[in-house]
Every structure is written in C-alpha cells, then in structure tokens.
Image: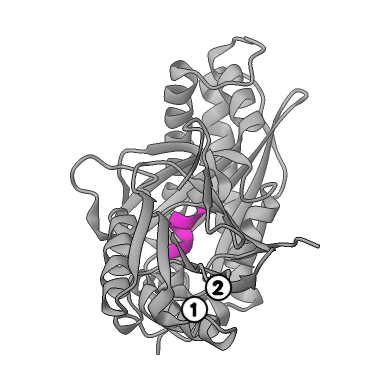
Amino acid sequence: MTFTIEDLNNLHLDVLREIGNIGSGNAASALAKMINKRIDMDVPIVQILAFEDVAAILGGEEMVVAGIYFEVEGDITGNIMFLLDIASSKILTSILMGREDGSEELDEMDRSALQEVGNILSGSYISSLSALTGLKIKLSVPSLCIDMAGAILSVPAIQFSQTSDKIVLIETLLKEGSNQVKGNFFLIPDSKSFDKLLQSLGVYS
Amino acid sequence: MQKVIKVGMADLQVVEEPHILTTLGLGSCVGIALYDKQKKIAGLAHIMLPSSTQIKNNSNLAKFADTAIDLLIKEMVKRGASTARLKAKITGGAQMFSFGNNGGDLMKIGYRNVIATKEILELYKIDILAEDTGGNHGRTIEFYSETGDLLVKTIGFGLKTI
C-alpha cells in the first residue's frame, strides 16, 4: 500500500515528535558548543497542516523569512527546509558572531553565518533520524533564500503536493538568555522514502 | 464597493468590474491572469504543477496548469466572457533555491510551470500580452478587472505594472 500524509495517526505523530525532540536537542547542544553558552529548548511542536495554513503561522505569505534548503540523499531522498523569521535569523547570527549591529538587515556575513548554522541544525536532525532508523541519510550543501514566506514555502508545498496537500512541520524554540529563536523544520521525503521512513521506524501499518 | 478577492495556492477565482484579484507570495508557482476586456471579467489561477496527467493525486483542478486553465476559461465563460476575447498575463515561476548545476527536476519546477502554461494557452489560442516570470524572487500580484492591469510587487526588486 502507499502511505500518504493524511494516513498519519497519533502514533506516527508521536514518532515524528520524538525525532523532532531528539533532533532539536542535538541541534541545541551543537549550537551551545559552538558559541560556548547555554542553550535551552522547548519541547518541539509537531503539526500536520494544509499548506495554505503554513504561511499564516509564519505571519502571512508576504512576511519576509529566511529559508535554508537541502537535498537529502542516501537510503531516503527528498528535501529538508529550515525556516526562520528575520528577527530570529538576526538573533541567531548575532549570538553566533558575538556582535550586535542593531540592524534589522541581514548582510553577507549574516547570510553566510545563517547558512552555516542551518547546516549544523539540519545536520543534527538528520543524524538523529539516521540513528533512529538505521537509514543512511546524507545532506547536500545548503541553499539560502530570503524572501516572502509564501514564495519560499511554494518549494516544499509543490513537492508535498505531488503526494498530498499537507505538510509536516516541526517547530522548535531555542533560548539563549533572553534571546529566543524560533525555527521551523520541514521534513519532505519523496513518497517512496516516506514509506521507507515509517517502515524503519516500525510504525508502518 | 470594490472588493479584493484572494486567490490561494492551487486555487482560482473570477471577478467582474470593479473587483480586484490578488495572490500573495508567488514563488515557483505561476499566476495565470485571463481578461475579457469588453466584459471586464478577470480570472486568476495560482497553479503549482505543470500537468495533471503525470500525477495520481490530481483531484484539485486548480493545482495544475492544464486543468486550471481549462476550468478558469469555463468559469469566465459562465460569467459572460468569450474565449476568443481572452488575453493572458503570466507571472511567477521563480527558482527560489539553487544547487549549482545539478538542480534536478524539482529545482526547475518554476521553469516547467511557465513552459506548460504557455503551451496550454497556445492550445486555447489565448495570446500572452505580458509576462514577468523566472528569476529567484517571490512576487505578490494584484489583477484589476477595470483595466486588466497586473501589478507585481517584490522584495528588493520593486513594483511594476504589466
């Protein structure tokens, strides 16, 4: 049988939530190590949404956001995307580079830092997933785009739309002191890999 | 009173003068605006994929260039438009992310959406009066049924009317 996102039940969601949890935990400790500061994390929220509702969560289709996109290769194929609002992006790069330039704009330095931190965070999710499933999963180099949320989301939405009209979103809140960084992580396996992924997690029904 | 009607992803709408159609944050999707100047009837489709024939999950007709254009024309004709008078303006089809040369099919989806849209419009013999497609940035569009003007807004690339 072919599995679609609509068929996901509570058990599957729990598994995805757990992956989100472990992945975010690893991501937080990787980040903490990098900046040598304590990073706290809230339990990630895992949601399945219709793609037209995803932009609303981010503040609307025209809200400017940063998306970091990767191709996934290995035993499963597809893409992952890490998405941050501009305020969170700025906080993250400021923490990372230990500077406060007071500007809302992201310069070249911010962009390259963002790409790198996206790389580390996404890598953490993927290695958790890999460890839990025993599947070999490799990430491509990151590609960064800063633009309207709707336009950036069209990329995973199109990909999802070939199997379903829903999207799986893992929302993570990272905290460093009074700084809060909200990251949205989209896991987008292609349909064959989606089956394989659930099978490896032992939740295939 | 003039209303602004929102067209979502994989959605299409038709309005008559004086109303406005809008779609927010078009990325790799394509916005297909059709206009009957004589009757001042405007239709806008926001498609995601080139073709309904290559996919199993194809019940949403507004999602695909082929079925969306067909449905949009039918809806406009129902309101009194004539297929022979329809003219098109198209936008979107950007490549938001790039991965060097080995982009793969997904990365070219914007381009494929534009090509498919043009081919299908040609089948219906609908001329494309203007287009603002491709690039690597998002677009918000407003389509005015009074004039047939299509306003394209971007982040960092300004505003233009086509």
- Res A76 visible: no
Q: Is residue B9 magenta?
A: no
Residue position marked by numbered label 2 in the rendering: B12
Residue B144, horizontal then vertical, whole percent: 60, 57
The front one of B33 and A107 is: B33
Q: Main secondary structure of the magenta part?
A: helix
Task: Find the residue positioned furthest to the right.
Answer: B1
Badge 2 crowding class, 10 Å Cα cut-off, few under 14, some 14 to 19, many 20 or more, is many
Which amino acid type is shown beneath numbered disc 1? Leu
Q: Which residues are magenta?
A: A153-158
Q: Are marks 2 and 1 in contact (CB under 8 Å)?
A: yes
Q: Where does the image place residue A56, in percent across and percent down from the top left?
A: 69, 54
From the top left corner, tell me how far across and down residue B127 is, in percent: 32, 66
> Please, what secondary structure does the residue beneath circle 2 have?
strand
Going from N to C along the chain, the mark reached first, 2 or 1, is 2
Give the residue type that dot 2 points to. Answer: Leu
Residue in the foreground of this view, choosing between B11 and A35: B11
Of A159 and A74, the residue lying toward us = A159
- The residue that appears at 26% across and 63% down in the rendered structure is B115
Numbered disc in front, either 2 or 1? 1
- Tell me the residue at 44%/77% (across/down): B68
Q: Is residue A199 above or below residue B108?
A: below
In the rendered image, which quarter is residue A18 located in? bottom right
Q: Which residue is mark 1?
A: B72
Look at the image and tell me whether residue B33 can be seen: yes
